[in-house]
Image (cartoon, rainbow, N blue to C red):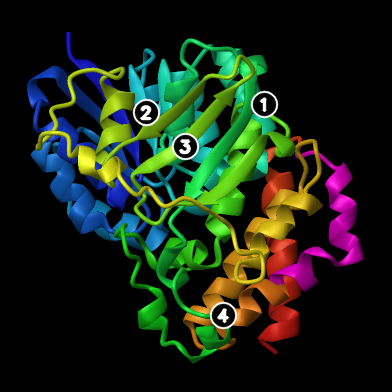
Amino acid sequence: MKKKIAILGSTGSIGKTCLKIIARDKKNFKLELLSAKKNYKLLISQAKKFNVKNIIITDKKYYHIAKNKKIKSINIYNNFEKLSKIFPKKIDYAMCAIVGLDGLSPLLKIIKHTKKIAIANKESIICAWNLIHNALDKHKTQFIPVDSEHFSIWYALKNNQNKNISKIYLTASGGSLLNIKKNKFDKLKISDILKHPNWNMGKKITIDSSTLMNKVFEVIEAKKIFNLEYKQIGIIIHPQSFIHAIVKFSDGMIKIIAHETTMEIPIHNTIYDCKNYKAKNIFNFKKLNNINFSNVDIKKFPSVKIIKKLPVKNSLYETVLITANDEFVKLFLNKKIKFSKIFEETIKMINRIEFNKLKKIQPNKISDVIDTRNLVRNKIKSYYLN
């Protein structure tokens, strides 16, 4: 029987990789749904290639353009309100790869319609983990994280309970600025900072990698997903990006999880239940020589200090952090602020009294998260764009 699959965000890098994997074994899969925000041309092309009957285009302008093409073989929707119609029964697997908090509502909506969900949306996990966790429990849906670090931890823990964990280390490449002195950061061109040494990523995440803010977000994710304390999670620099996580157990044993710098491996394993991956090359053991671990240089990457400011419980403060960083990265990419100001202004914003109060408030519904995001955006707009 074919495995029934849905991909939310199929035109992005994670979605494309997912389709690439499925294309190699099309006879064993049936794609029930694909979605995108604006890229309707690629979405329709994907739907035709994989014989998908249902697509969702969330941007109204591009939804109407696609609708006017009157493609008889494809049902085109503008939102995720018709999932019960699209999925009369639970499907086998859903990949949630919509970027940012725009992916939160679709993610929560599709959980009840799938037996297994792979989530590649860190913003939703960071800002609304309690809502996601409750939905997973309610609908008995299996969850697997897709980020290479969190998939590696999940993989290492398959036969162990979280209470046996002594310490987890997430590895960070150091991005494009690892070997550049801090006093030269503001003199670099944006194009220089966007040259990640190991991964081909979007502009936003590449900037977050260069500030190590992305690793701060991954620490928050790991804390929430695996029900840990922040003191149980560390960050170490590993320029080669071959080892993704290290798990030290209370019995003294250590697991080091490594794989090539490709998202195909974690995505493939979420689809195939950790089976049947065909490596292209024989294992190059030389990659394990001179691994070159080091501690994070706090002066160069001060963003990691934010971890000490984070509340123990799920709160709206995480949404403040995510949003503030997003907005200041945008300002940098638009050449409105210097690179060093990304962290400086983010710290100023999250330290504001009205936002510090949110450390004690847990999101109870999606609108709590979205309203907080909008509040931070408006505050930044009033201060920095007027």
The magenta span reads: 346-363
Residue 231 magenta-highlighted = no
Query: CA separation, marks 1 and 2?
Result: 23 Å
- The x and y percentages for residue 317 are 77, 51
- Give the mark nearest the N terminus, 2 or 4: 2
Label 4 sits on residue = 182
Whole-Å distance between the Cαs marked 1 and 4? 35 Å
| Picture disc at residue 227 | 1
167 displayed left or right of 177: right
220 relative to 58, above or below: above
Q: Which of 27 and 90 is in front in this view?
A: 27
Image mark for residue 102: none
Q: Could you tell me the amino acid type at mark 1?
A: Asn
Amino acid beneath label 2: Ala
Q: Residue 203, how many percent across, how many down?
A: 40, 68
- Please report whichever mark, 3 or 4, sits nearer to the chain's N-terminal start: 4
Vertical side of 165 occupied by 368: above or below: below
Q: Which residue is drawn at 52% across and 87% down?
A: 184
Question: What label does residue 94 carry, if any?
Answer: 2
In the drawing, what numbered circle is on residue 245?
3
Residue 83 x/y as whole percent: 42, 28
User: In the rendered view, would you say 180 is above or below 364?
Assistant: below
